[in-house]
Amino acid sequence: MDSRKNKKEGKKKKQEREPIVAYLSFPAFLTIVSSSVEVFRKETIGYLVGFKGERKYRVEYAIPYQTADSGYVHASVDMDRVSRINEILSKVSQGLEFVGDFHSHTVFGNSPGTVIPSDADLASTIPGEINLICAVNLKKRAVRWRENARGILLGTIGDYRIDIGGYYVEAATIGRKYDRVAVKCPAVTGIKEEEE
Ligand SMILES: [Zn+2]
């Protein structure tokens, strides 16, 4: 029995929020992957510069931090650095701003690197920014670059298997609450038709 009172077809279903999507430019993709592979068995960290939209981010540049904090320690986010970057960007480009961070995860003993944020990652995450994790493992077989159903961008380069996943923390809360960010890079996966 369908008892809809108003037949507003135009009214959108707002029960499910659209997933947050991060679109990587080819240069940003290259920097994230190459800096992560270069320090394989250690972790790299850097920041992301681009444009913010409604639950959409365009990542134009990825810039690894120069601080050589070697080892498996997760560097904390330096807010001074964020404001310095934004100060420079505000003078040169309309709309281009700091949009988030990236870092790599790698093999640790027998544990493979994953795109799942650690407790330390979540503790140092800035709410409202996107966070990309580039997991680097030794490849078992070659796969072509694609996005999987969970929004992870994956593929192989040389001896390595790369998985890039994203997460987002809406507001500062205690605990492990985060949204997954779908990572896309049409430059490496090929242009796909819009699904909606
Ligand atoms: Zn991490």
Image: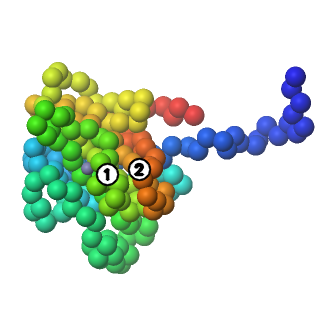
Residue 187 visible, this orientation: no
Residue drawn 57% across and 34% down? 196
Q: Dividing the picture into quarters, in which one does residue 125 lie? A: bottom left
Residue 62 visible, this orientation: yes
Task: State if disc 1 and disc 2 touch (CB < 8 Å).
Answer: yes
Residue 16 position, x and y percent, is: 61, 41
Residue drawn 41% across and 59% down? 129
Foreground of the two, 190 or 85? 85
Helix, strand or loop at label 2? It is loop
Answer left or right for 43 relative to 164.
left
Above or below 138: residue 116: below
Q: Which mark is residue 136?
A: none
Residue 35 position, x and y percent, is: 15, 50
Residue 30 position, x and y percent, is: 21, 46
Residue drawn 15% across and 38% down? 107
Above or below 165: residue 78: below
Mark 2 CB lies closer than 8 A to ligand 1: no
- Mark 1 sits on what residue? 119
